[in-house]
Amino acid sequence: MLPLIVFAILVGAAGLKLPRDRRQRLQDGLETVTDLMTGIVHFALKLAPYAVPAMIFSVVVKVGFDIIIALGLFVVGCVAMLLLHLFGTMSLWIRFLAKRSPAEFFRQIKDVLVTAFSTSSSSATLPAALAAAARAARRRALDRRLRAAARHDHEHERHGALRGLRRAVRRAGVSACTSTLSRRSRWCSCPC
């Protein structure tokens, strides 16, 4: 794979040295090769549902049915260990290192897990992971705003006598902190 990557980099670097019209022809030719390779991959994907069982059948005929049992046990063992890691050790890490509820965490990343399991592709899973992270960030920001509003309301309820005075100061367009009422900070620490 590394030689192919080096070759692609060298072709790209040499292609940059070509005149504009020849560079465009090179780019068009490479796009044609890309279309051909994509067609081959699509052909292989259409053939795979028939080819995989045929290859399994040929192995079973050569080795015997015991190979299916051995591979089945291997798959069950792998799945069991992956589930133990996902819901066992990772749950401990989430609980003690991140100080979060594992059940809440797994509920939040459910879409990411389903996408990762069904596609087996990190490229396909990345958008789902980013969307889950964005939802979690919005939820945390909303929680912070709600907690701040609750603290703010609690302080106002404790010092209800100052509410009318604060409203009057706000209507006058004067910041309470710079007004002559700034001594009120003894009673209320809210930023209003």
Image (tube, rainbow, N blue to C red):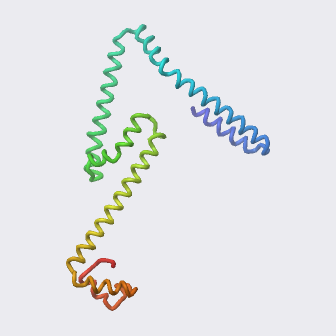
Seen at 34% across and 85% down, the residue is 176
Residue 58, horizontal then vertical, whole percent:
45, 11
Seen at 22% across and 81% down, the residue is 160
Seen at 31% across and 25% down, the residue is 76
Quarter holding the N terminus? top right
Q: Is residue 15 left or right of residue 59?
A: right
Residue 147, placed above or below residue 126: below
Residue 7, horizontal then vertical, whole percent:
65, 35
Residue 54, horizontal then vertical, whole percent:
47, 14
Q: Is residue 55 left or right of residue 21?
A: left
Seen at 30% across and 43% down, the residue is 90
Q: How many marks?
A: 0
| Quarter of the view holding residue 175 | bottom left
Residue 17, placed above or below residue 139: above
Q: Nearer the viewer, residue 158 or 75?
A: 158
| Quarter of the view holding residue 117 | top left
Q: Is residue 151 left or right of residue 8?
A: left
Q: Residue furthest left?
A: 158
Quarter holding the C terminus? bottom left
